[in-house]
Amino acid sequence: MLVFTYFAIFFFSGSVLLAYMLATEAVPWVGLAIITFFIGLFFIMVSPAMLITPERAIELRDREIKS
């Protein structure tokens, strides 16, 4: 659910920034900087989930099923 929320925010803010860049005179590298910024935020958000061991993931899944 968190990833879907992040993507919704990403697409909304990206479309607003694109509209702003089209309406004003921005240098071409601004768009690339914005995209890489959001990609970096995504990796920062996802990185703790990558540290979970398979055994811990099974334990968390079983606890969620029991609840």
Image: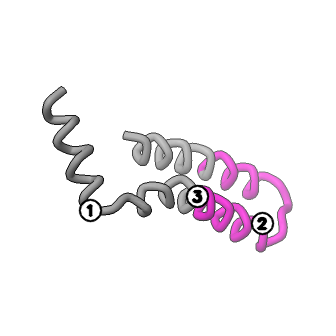
> Which residue shows up at 24% across the image and 58% down it?
55
Q: Which residue is mark 2?
A: 30
Q: How is the image coloured?
A: one colour
Measured along the vertical axis of the image, is residue 11 above or below residue 30?
Answer: above
Q: Disc number at residue 44?
A: 3
Could you tell me residue 14's position as x and y percent?
61, 52
Measured along the vertical axis of the image, is residue 14 above or below residue 40?
Answer: above
**Mark 2 secondary-structure assignment:** helix
Q: Which residues are magenta?
A: 15-41
Q: Is residue 17 magenta?
A: yes
* Residue type marked 1: Pro
* Residue type marked 3: Ile
Write down the quadrant of residue 4 in the picture: top left
Closer to viewer: mark 2 or mark 1: 1
Q: Nearer the viewer, residue 65 or 13?
A: 65
Q: Is residue 36 magenta?
A: yes
Q: Is residue 21 left or right of residue 48?
A: right
Q: Which residue is mark 1?
A: 54
Main SS class of the magenta portion in the image? helix
